[in-house]
Amino acid sequence: MTVRVLVVDDHPLYREGLATAISAMPGKTVVGEAGDGDEAIRRVEELSPDVVVMDLHMPGTNGVEATRAVTALDPAPAVLVLTMLENDDSVFAAMRAGARGYLLKGSTGAEIGRALDGVANGEVVFSAGIAERVLAFFAGGPARREAVPFPQLTEREREILDLVARGLTNAAIARKFVLSDKTVRNHVSNVFTKLQVAGRAEAVARARDAGLGGPADEA
């Protein structure tokens, strides 16, 4: 059986190099490429690949959202995440979205080849360090405590970040929680500081990578 693969990454040189490497693997063929999540969804519908190799941090529709969309299709491809993001927030968001594998960029060609075969055959595959954290999660270990997105945030800060990721303005958030505009600005500022992000766009990207956010509410 030949595994038909779609490669999704927003960096053209990396994407093309990865596609070339996969094409050279026995029993693998690259049927297409995509540079963002929206294009990935379209290409899956057009090409019906067996496996989608998915980056997470991309402009527009990110890898978590794209994974959720393509795994809801019928037939659905297996999604193998290949990313630089190794934090627990990203790992668990991807798995909740339906990914069957999670590798870090820097994995060898042999590791990627084995993972492609594994997820195509219905297995779940992780990089070694990721696997340890996932096992600890199910064993009730430290990773379980980290499974809540951004544990460094308070519950209210996490709620506000979720609304920011949904596209709400500070004023709309203030109305929703019956808070003053200044209080919301302070919460948002604290969130940016704790996440070490430069502004709203970067915070939204981090939040969506971690599975927060969704359809925009009232702005």
Image (spheres, grey):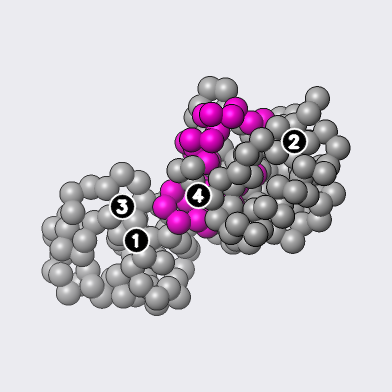
Q: CA distance from mark 2 to mark 1?
A: 41 Å
Q: Element at badge 4?
A: loop
Q: Element at badge 1?
A: helix
Q: Which residue is mark 1?
A: 161
Q: Which residue is mark 4?
A: 36
Q: Give the residue type at disc 4.
A: Asp
Look at the image and say whether residue 75 sits in the magenta stretch: no
Q: Which residue is mark 3?
A: 166
**Is 44 above or below relative to 139?**
above
Q: CA distance from mark 3 to mark 4?
A: 19 Å
Callout 3 touching callout 4 (CB < 8 Å): no
Q: Give the residue type at disc 2.
A: Thr
Which of labels 2 and 1 is toward the front? 2
- The image shows residue 112 at horizontal and vertical percentages of 77, 48
Which of labels 4 and 1 is toward the front? 4
Q: Which sits earlier in the primary sequence, circle 2 or circle 3? A: 2
Q: Which residue is mark 2?
A: 29
